[in-house]
Image (tube, grey):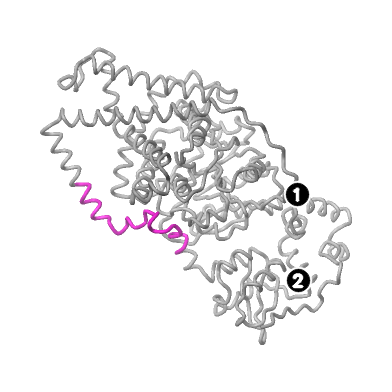
Amino acid sequence: MQHARHIAGAPQAGEDLGRFLQASGTLTAGTLLSVRALQAQCRTSIDRILISEGLLSPDEVATALSRFHGVPRADLSALPPDPELAGLIPLRLCLNNSAVPWRVDGERVQIAVSRPEDFARVLSFMDDAAPRAEMVIATASEIHAALARLHREKLTATASARVPESESCRGWERAGRARLGLTITLLAALFALTVFFPTHVFAALASWAAFTLLVAAGLRLSAYIAHVSRPPETPSPDLDPAKHPLPRVSVLVPLFKETEIAGALVQRLSRLTYPKPLLDIVLVLEENDHLTRETIASCTLPPWMRVIEVPEGRPKTKPRAMNYALDFCDGDIVGIWDAEDAPDPDQVNRVVQEFRRSPPDVVCLQGVLDYYNSRQNWLARCFTIEYAAWFRLLLPGMSRMGLSIPLGGTTLWFDRTVLEELGGWDAHNVTEDADLGFRLARHGYKTRVIETATGEEANCRVWPWVRQRSRWLKGYMVTYLVHMRDPLLFYRQMGPLKFWGFQAHFIAALSQFMLAPILWSFWLVLLGLPHPLDPFVSRAFLINLGIIFLMVEMLSILINATAVSGARHRHLLAWVPTMHFYFPLGAIAAYKALYGLIARPFFWDKTQHGHSLAHQEHASGVGSVGVQLQSGDESL
């Protein structure tokens, strides 16, 4: 079948859109010259540049394209696409090419696209049995809105279940009563054993706590040595854009129940140095979040920033929202920032450079997370110390050791093709980031930690800290149980080093939080006081255990002090010894997490941000920010 494209006033040979706009008086010669220079740098279409630089609105560009190519300008808002044509072109093809079948005109189907090159790609994939096609022009936002309406149910269902069920926790919904019954039985058995054999139960728990303490210490010491002994890196030269065209980058920014966020968000992201024609910032809003919608509507967003509204559905989580928005991204690289984030201005540039010089199996980059309100109070100081040790020392060390690593929930960058291949994020996992890190590893992909930082707001109130940490720990429990559903398969996929590294990290971390009160009992030994294990072992043995416990504490002080020894965090050195009083909060969070795992495994315990407004102006040049964020937190 011949595909026909009716163009009444098609451009003459040698004519292009730029000259057409100059001839019509829309662009001056000087403006066109600047646009040409930016086009040579970005290697992208002139219409993208005109829109991203604010020279023309998307509607003006669409009108100009329709006149230039002599095709109709479709107003999809006034005349929506015919629902009967929705299945004519596969949804994925429509999403990837910003195209939608619009209307039937005689024997021809009019296909709305935002760029003529998209129409050509759609035609090349259309079935030969399809009717003759005709191009019409609409804006990308009009096409996306039309696709969202036409395929609402399918897109909503897909966002909740992109990950294969064998690698997701969503099937737990069907086993709620069985899980509760099993838990009650196990707790009753433990209670009975404790009543009749209290010393024996304590001895068993103390033995396990001591063992996992040594495992955790060994892992941390190995990561520390691997990181501090690394040879200095030789900076790679920047790649020539003329020989290596820069990719288009999409960044998802999930928002929920915001107030004064938009102005500060635009201010921070406007500092990014990556070319705006290749930058696609997507603000992800919940459909029924009227507060945030009104706030965003009252602000003027730059042309390279847009809004995607996620239809109502369950579960209402950050990963589900990102799964939905992923379908509407058009970047080759997909990143994530939280609403209160303040990334380094050159972060996207460094991400692109790192992907270019990394081997093909490196498909994820994790940046460093930092806090810009570290002087606010003691809790904020300790939180900053913890993050400095984790992101600046331990994670890079574990990665250098060849272990798979859990991801943080922000400053993450993915090869989009691989992200879609793996099904995006598990919408039901409340630490979807940690889960995705190990899903990447079990499918043969690698994550690399890069030295680019993003400032965030430290949770500096006790109970909100406990709630946030309990969600992270609950997600850790869920992630461990999901990946250990078939241990032999997981072992074959990960290999021995990564498999046992996974065990050491998760089991030790969860055990240390859950059994922290038992570990604290060794202070009794060091202080010369009686200990519950005295009837079982000699005092000399207990003293040796107490000394080991003290050595592990000294190791933690060494690691934390090293992490904050740089100029940016040096003011925190004096507070490092107080970290011993910070981690007991984690035990409370662990017990809350265990309850949540049993009773509400998919509940997203949201974190309220915006309590450090007076401190945000201080760090990294971040201006005063009015943020009240309730979603989009990172996990451990």
Label at residue 7? none
Q: Check if residue 172 falls in the magenta segment.
A: yes
Badge 1 crowding class, 10 Å Cα cut-off, few under 14, some 14 to 19, many 20 or more, is: few
Magenta-highlighted residues: 157-184
Asked if disc 1 and disc 2 are in contact, CB closer than 8 Å, the reply is no
Q: Which mark is residue 243?
A: 1
Q: Residue at point 70% right, 75% down?
A: 135
Residue at screen point 68% across, 73% down: 74
Q: Is residue 178 magenta?
A: yes
Amino acid found under the numbered disc labelled 2: Ser
Instruction: Give the amino acid type for the residue marked by disc 1 in the picture.
Output: Lys
Q: Position of residue 118 (x, y in %)?
A: 68, 67
Q: In the image, is 447 to the left or to the right of 272?
A: left
Residue 530 x/y as whole percent: 20, 16
Q: Say how many tags the image has.
A: 2
**Residue 102 placement, left or right of 499:** right
Task: State the separation of the CA atoms marked 1 and 2.
Answer: 32 Å
Residue nearer the viewer, 176 or 264: 176
Place residue 260 in its image quadrant: top right
- Dot 2 crowding, Cα within 10 Å, few <14, some 14–19, many 20+: many
Find residue 332 and report its horizontal and vertical position in percent.
62, 54
Residue 44 vertical placement versus 558 (above, below): below
Q: Which residue occupies 43% across, 41% down?
A: 498
Horizontally, residue 531 falls left or right of residue 311, namely left
Foreground of the two, 585 or 551 = 551
Secondary structure at numbered mark 1: loop
Q: Quadrant of the C terminus?
A: top left
Q: Which residue is mark 2?
A: 66
